[in-house]
Amino acid sequence: MTRIVLTEELIRDRADGRSFERGKTYYAGGAVRGLAVDGASASATVDGTRAYRVQLRVTPRGLDGDCSCPYGQDGMFCKHCVATALAWLARGETSRAPSATPPDARPAPATGAKPATATDERLRGFLESQDPRWLAAELLRAAHADPLLRARLEVAAGADTRNAFDDRDLRRRLANAIQIDEHDYADPYPYAHPGRVSDALSEVSRLIAAGFADKAAELSEYALELIEASAGHLDDSNGELGDALATAQEIHLEACRAAAPDPVELADRLLDMALASEYEVFLDALPGYAEVLGEAGMAHYRCRLEAMWQALPPSRPGVYDDGRFTVTYLMERLAEHEGGGDALIEVLARDVSSSYDVFRISERLAGDGRDEEALGWIQRGLDEFSDEGGHEAKLRTLGAECLQRLGCRDAAMRLLWANFAENPSLSAYQALHTTAQGTLAQDTAAQGTAEAAESWRERALALLAALPAAVEPRESTPHIQSAGHSVLVEVLLWEEDVEGAWQAAQRGGCREDLWLRLARARAEAHPADALPVLRQVAERLVEAKHRSAYRLAAGLLVESAVLYGRCGREEDFHAYMATLRTTHRAKRALRDELDRAGLPPSQAGRP
């Protein structure tokens, strides 16, 4: 089989044109860090919006690549892969896929080891022929530069695994990457050095495969503590802090699985760190750690957590307590892990003090197919608690879903009507409509069913029509205007009743965006009616005095030109544009946008 060699042409063929050019820019800008080459494969970290990890392989089929960026996760050969490939090519090391060889023609690699490449075999032959004293000297030299290699050699020489790896340098690297001095708030690490934490955590992760999982667990906990301590001084709007927290917790779990730490001590650390954390560290430890904790660890975890939960004072409506939330949340995760839905509901039901608490219980019961029990809780929530953040409406909606599944559509309609009457909206109307249509489909033979469904519609439209009409804006507050009959207009447009929507808007007014929708729909049959609306909105945008508004205004005027043409009034449009240009002749940006849109010049400029 032909041997594939890494070349720029191979990289260019593997990526699309845009990714290749942007990858070249990344490579030229020094975004590739930590390039490691192992025969026909390479890995590196590439700094982009955040630090991305890239893995490349030259195979008999060509060049393959994986990247942790969203584009790479979709299987594409992204710009980060291109940058890494170019860095690999520039290094000049062997980057050639081995020829295909029958499986029985080479010795099988040891379990867990990478398959030997042609380069490995050549190097092995060379090393086996050298003086052992020279080999020892070279190994010692390499060990001085690589603490992990030194630790592996120390263990091979009989040292205790727990003490063989000197983690002082890695702790310093973690501290330098994560700790932020209070005076550095203006230049926080997520923007200045987004790759440092990723690199340091990658080194921690390497310890697991090298046989030092217990040390990796310690260092990942240390990293979590550093991130917590520095979080108040970081601007995490790009999400690097959250990514670092998630990565450190993933490494910790992987390390614990490999190291099998004392289960009781681990249970204590998981609980203590979760209770002390302001950033939800180990809040979702279960079910991931259950196998590592085993029976003894889980028993200790459960005992401590239940004692804290039982000791909580009764909750008070409207009072939020971080500590109470953490203990309760951990207890919910424990209950769901060990006892499923019933155990979780028991925990949730212990201390109900709001409609939100009732909604969570009802939602879980309904999700488990226990609609009748859910309805009992929903009724309690509606009876005992006033609306808090929309949860009363959510309870009614959930109750309507349960009732429909139980075949009680009239009762479901009553709940949905209460939502609609309390807060009229298109979505609330659509819920009523859907349920009414479901009743018709289910019981087409029932006498009066169609009339009942139509009755709901008439009542809803009457309620919307009775809402106050729009208030004309005052000169002192020109941007303030009531919504008027906006919901009625939305509903009628949704029902494709353009004439009814137009009449409703004429009587009660509506929002500007709805006027535009309505005018465009009205223009299909009545272009002259739509013209004043388009012009009015365009003129308001012209008064806004910024280019983006001028661009929108020009677009509306282009639409107006078409409607003027359909009405046979082209001359009127030219006259209108002449007046508009003359009135606003000082606005150069407006003139530019009108010209760019191809709108007619002033009357004076016409032949």
Image (cartoon, grey):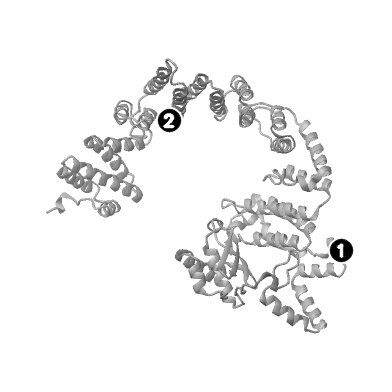
Residue 460 x/y as whole percent:
41, 22
Residue type at numbered disc 1: Asp
Q: Is residue 218 above or below residue 319?
A: below
Whether residue 340 appears in this view of the structure is yes
Residue type at numbered disc 2: Leu
In this picture, residue 492 sits left or right of residue 123: left
Q: Earlier in the sequence, mark 1 or mark 2?
A: 1
Dot 1: what SS? loop
Q: Nearer the viewer, residue 85 or 518?
A: 85
Query: On the image, numbered disc 2 is attached to which residue?
Result: 426
Using a 10 Å C-alpha cutoff, classify the residue at mark 1 as few (fewer than 14 neighbours), some (14 to 19) or many (20 or more): few
Dot 2: what SS? helix
Residues at marks 1 and 2, CA–CA distance in whole angstroms? 70 Å
Image quarter where the N terminus lies is: bottom right
Residue 485 x/y as whole percent:
36, 27
The label shown at residue 160 is 1
In this picture, residue 125 sits left or right of residue 372: right
In this picture, residue 19 sits left or right of residue 313: left
Q: Are marks 1 and 2 in contact (CB under 8 Å)?
A: no
Q: Residue at x 67, y 57 (%)?
A: 178
The label shown at residue 181 is none
Number of numbered callouts drawn: 2
